[in-house]
Image (cartoon, helix red, strand yellow):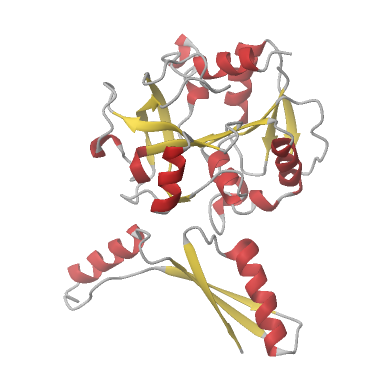
Amino acid sequence: MRAGIVVFPGINRERDMAIALEASTGRKPRMIWHRETDLSGLDLIVVPGGFSYGDYLRCGAMAAQSPVMSEIRAHADRGGHVLGVCNGMQILTEAGLLPGAMLRNAGLRFLSMDCHLRVERADTAFTGRYRAGEVFRAPMAHGDGNFFADDDTLDRLEGEGLVAFRYATPEGAIVREANLNGSSRNIAGVYSANLRVLGLMPHPEDLVDPLMGGTDGKPLFDGLAAALAA
Amino acid sequence: MKATVTIMLKAGVLDPQGKAIGQALHGLGFGSVGEVRAGKVIELELAETDPSQARSQAEEMARKLLANQVIESFKVDIS
């Protein structure tokens, strides 16, 4: 699998992402500066976390209009895979590659802590190394992670199986107490209609080595490496 | 011309910032304050001299960048 990581000004999680991708694929991912427009030859494009353009206007709003975004859109239209984490998810929703929008956390606080995610389906390129219903731990670090979509859109996402992960208790219960940022229906991650674009707020790339305190996030990258092996 | 774009969260979208401001106002003794909603105002200086052209330009900017219509609504005032 050949992966590329998009780097916008203000992004700060690209190196963690590179470590996670290299550990699973054995290849160093390509770093893509936001002014680049040639993304040919890549199987996976990752939009990492951080604070692109200082989060001005709305988180991800500026990055969503940058030159590289139209190439990412073309890659997605060709059926290419895209992963957005944290600010990356905000950017992908702002760009319209994913449904919904991200609001300020319901409690207004920046949340930096571990959370637990329930895997809603295990038959996508991103989740093949998890089991459906499995719960894994992931660190979260965001101020605007409150996923919002109107009820019709939420019903459609659920009906079409486009909810990727939900905030859960360690035992897998989908309850309000586990939904720290107030997201609609505990949604922590969503897919595009063709299941090839995934966005999630927590950081699986930060738990891929025992030295980091756990390997809960590693199956996501191992699964991608296996699904997109070339 | 000057275009003033006012952007507000749509009705039905939780506005925690507005809520916090409302609570602070109550704490200051302004007990009569009901719901508080917080938004943003963006002023644009436009070279355009025709008001209706200026309006449609500002509206296009709002749709493309200034507002996220999944969660926000906007209104444009021209002066």
Any part of residue A207 in sight = yes
- Count of number-bearing discs: 0
In the rendered structure, the answer to whether residue A194 lies left or right of residue A120 reads right
Residue A89: where, in percent of width, then height?
A: 54, 40
Any part of residue A149 in sight = no
In the rendered structure, the answer to whether residue B68 lies left or right of residue A95 reads left
Dividing the picture into quarters, in which one does residue B2 lie? bottom right
- What residue appears at the point 59 percent right and 65 percent down from the top-left corner? B66
Image quadrant where one finds the C terminus of chain B? bottom right
Residue A109: where, in percent of width, then height?
A: 35, 47
In the rendered structure, the answer to whether residue A126 lies left or right of residue A184 reads right
Question: Nearest the camera: A116 or A209?
Answer: A116
- What residue appears at the point 31 percent right and 70 percent down from the top-left corner? B36
- What residue appears at the point 37 percent right and 18 percent down from the top-left corner? A134
Dividing the picture into quarters, in which one does residue A192 lie? top right
Residue A24: where, in percent of width, then height?
A: 61, 12
Residue B31 versus residue A223 in the image, above or below: below
Residue A66 versus residue A21 in the image, above or below: below
Image quadrant where one finds the N terminus of chain B? bottom right
Residue B9: where, in percent of width, then height?
A: 43, 65
Dividing the picture into quarters, in which one does residue A159 lie? top left
Question: Nearest the camera: A77 or B16?
Answer: A77
